[in-house]
Image (tube, grey):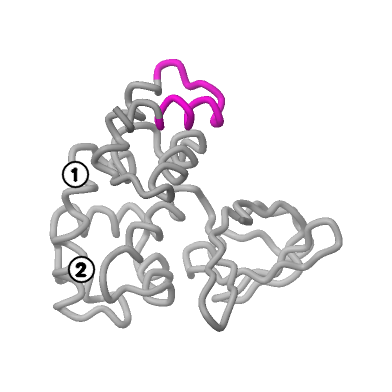
Amino acid sequence: MIGRLRGELIQKLPNLALVECGGVGYAAAISLSTYGLLPEPGAQVILHTELLVRENEIALLGFSSPSERELYRMLVKVDGVGPKLALAALGALPLEDLVQAIRSRDVKALTRVPGVGKKTAEKLCFELSEKMGGSSGLAGLGGPGAPGDPWESDLRSALTNLGFREEAVLPVMAGLRAEKPPLAEAIRQALKALQR
């Protein structure tokens, strides 16, 4: 899996960034908010990525921060929200405003996103507001902890990809956060705790 790109920005379009890494050009679909944060072509850039594999296509999505990528992952888990709609949502509102709209169940603000009707907005609020509750701003994304903490997001991703539910994973992660062992060791310890 390609998790991050660091290289020279060759081209930027409102929906695409072309980044050259080690002589290979990677085209990544991006949101308008990421586009607004990109430097001019020729500069060095870092994109946090998500690899999308479907029956008839393989696509790379690029995000300006781990928080934006984490919010994308939450959005596409909602029935009826695909990658295109999730990227549109991330570009239509600043990240903090989008999180706040979902947390406060502001259906009206969410319907301003192109392609999001009242039903989809209500579904987003219903399914995600609880997951984003409890903390202010982006710290509420996916549970407690520092927003964009790569150790935490990698550990959560590894455990949920192994089939464990987030409700079971988050308390185990909280127990490991103080020590923060290397990722491989953290996964081993978490698996041991989850299989009790």
Q: Quadrant of the N terminus?
A: bottom right
Mark 2 and mark 1: span between their CA atoms? 18 Å
Which mark identifies residue 38?
A: none
Q: In this image, 19 relative to 73: left or right?
A: right
Q: Nearer the viewer, residue 183 or 21?
A: 183
Label 1, on which residue? 133
Disc 1 marks a residue whose amino acid type is Gly
Q: In this image, 134 relative to 83: left or right?
A: left
Disc 2 marks a residue whose amino acid type is Ala
Q: Quadrant of residue 13?
A: bottom right
Q: Quadrant of residue 28?
A: bottom right
Q: Position of residue 159 (x, y in %)?
A: 41, 42
When the figure is inspected, residue 159 is found, relative to residue 81, above or below; the finding is above
Q: In this image, 55 relative to 106: left or right?
A: right
Q: Position of residue 175 (x, y in %)?
A: 33, 21
Q: Position of residue 93 (x, y in %)?
A: 34, 65
When the figure is inspected, residue 47 is found, relative to residue 24, above or below; the finding is above
Label 2, on which residue? 109
When the figure is inspected, residue 180 is found, relative to residue 39, above or below; the finding is above
Q: Residue at x 33, y 32 (%)?
A: 195
Q: Quadrant of residue 95?
A: bottom left
Q: Position of residue 121 (x, y in %)?
A: 19, 71
Q: Quadrant of the C terminus?
A: top left
Q: Residue at x 51, y 38 (%)?
A: 150
> Looking at the image, which residue sits at the far top?
179
> Looking at the image, which residue sits at the far front?
196
Q: Residue at x 35, y 66 (%)?
A: 76
Which segment is the magenta one? 178-191
